[in-house]
Image (cartoon, coloured by chain):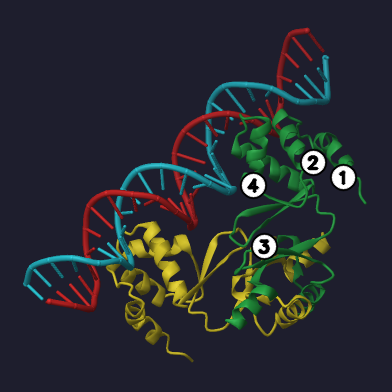
Chain colours: A yellow, B green, C cyan, D red
DNA sequence: CTCGTTATTGCATGTTGTGGCGATAGCATC
DNA sequence: GATGCTATCGCCACAACATGCAATAACGAG
């Protein structure tokens, strides 16, 4: 188990190393992120920041997220509807499955997606960025439901 | 080779069968689509409609696209940036690869993606909708470029 | 503690879509 | 050709981001 806390406490230094600054607005967002795990949408993050600081400006949040992504603290992807989704501290590389029928979402880890990643790498030399992908389709339960109709 | 023209000339009847209507605005969009192949973004379609009819309203275009999707004439997906992309008359089911580094895009046909589709179906019973997926990663050329640096 | 440099912020504005609502206009019927 | 039902349109407002720009404020230096 990784000590997630240390990643966040060092953000300030990581920023300074690159000549970037530690501002109240960034502190607010890092605060929110450190209490978040899994996935969040951009607008969700804006809302949570506003709970701490009602003055929060959306563009500032989005721009800070870009910076944090460069530091490797978050990764962004797009959900089935195309909206931004952020993976916080992606300990394990994973992708997502989304059911068009019931709207459910599941994670697929690298191991399970191995054959996809492997086959594309073999045939094209294409390195899949699993964390950025949302695979859409129909889940087992919904397929059964349709079949029974 | 399928005769694409027939698909479009029958749109009117297909609409009528469902109690839907054939309007000038729909005619404009179908006109544009019949001269399009491959992929287009929503805003691109709005623009092209405006070239024919400058009065074109975006919401009408988007709503018509929804209707045409129900008829199976287009399929929508999301590009790497999350924007809507429409596949016109998807003769062959296919997905997309997008390189984060050079911005290039390639198509993957069902056959090539077979192992992905197959493995997820086997392990989870999840039926992948290939046409809706954009897989992001790094292409062979860009990987070589990075490796040589 | 004061300064000066310049990274960031906040604001205004633009883009891509979505959804409600009253007015319009297809089209089947007479 | 006139009529009525209701699908569709146009418009407006809003959601989720992105971006240019002038004003602000980190923070290293003195």
Is label 2 in contact with label 1 (beta carbons under 8 Å)?
yes
Q: Secondary structure at mark 4?
A: helix
Residue beneath label 3, please? Answer: A102
Q: Position of residue B22 (x, y in %)?
A: 76, 31
Horizontal placement of A94 versus A140: left or right?
left
Q: Secondary structure at mark 3?
A: loop
Residue beneath label 1, please? Answer: B4
Q: CA distance from mark 4 to mark 1?
A: 21 Å
Q: Position of residue C1 (x, y in %)?
A: 6, 72
Decide if residue B103 is in sight here: yes
Mark 4, Cα crowd under 10 Å, few <14 / some 14-19 / many 20+, is some
Mark 1, Cα crowd under 10 Å, few <14 / some 14-19 / many 20+, is few
Q: Specify the quadrant that holds the C terminus of chain B.
A: bottom right
Chain for mark 4? B
Horizontal placement of C9 versus B108: left or right?
left
Q: Residue at x 63, y 39 (%)?
A: B47
Q: Which quadrant would residue A78 be assigned to in this image? A: bottom right
Residue beneath label 2, please? Answer: B34
Q: CA distance from mark 4 to mark 2?
A: 15 Å
Mark 2, Cα crowd under 10 Å, few <14 / some 14-19 / many 20+, is some
Decide if residue A54 is in sight here: no
* Mark 2 on the same chain as mark 1: yes
* Mark 1 on the same chain as mark 3: no
Residue beneath label 4, please? Answer: B42
Q: Secondary structure at mark 2?
A: helix
Q: Nearer the viewer, mark 1 or mark 3?
A: 1
Q: CA distance from mark 1 to mark 3?
A: 33 Å
Q: CA distance from mark 2 to mark 1?
A: 8 Å
Q: Is residue C29 above or below residue B44?
A: above
Q: Position of residue A143 (x, y in %)?
A: 78, 66
Chain for mark 1? B
């Amino acid at each position: 188990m990784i000590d997630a806390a240390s990643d966040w406490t060092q953000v300030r230094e990581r920023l300074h190393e690159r000549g970037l600054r530690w501002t109240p607005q960034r502190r607010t967002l890092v605060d929110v992120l450190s209490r978040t795990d899994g996935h969040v949408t951009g607008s969700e993050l804006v809302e949570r920041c506003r709970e701490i600081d009602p003055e929060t400006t959306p563009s500032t949040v989005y721009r800070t997220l870009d910076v944090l992504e460069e530091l490797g603290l978050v990764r962004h992807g797009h959900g089935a509807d195309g909206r931004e989704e952020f993976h916080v501290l992606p300990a394990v590389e994973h992708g997502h499955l989304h059911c068009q029928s019931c709207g459910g979402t599941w994670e697929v880890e690298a191991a399970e997606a191995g054959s996809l990643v492997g086959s594309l790498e073999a045939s094209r030399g294409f390195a899949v960025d699993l964390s950025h992908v949302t695979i859409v389709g129909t889940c087992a339960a919904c397929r059964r439901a349709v079949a029974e109709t």
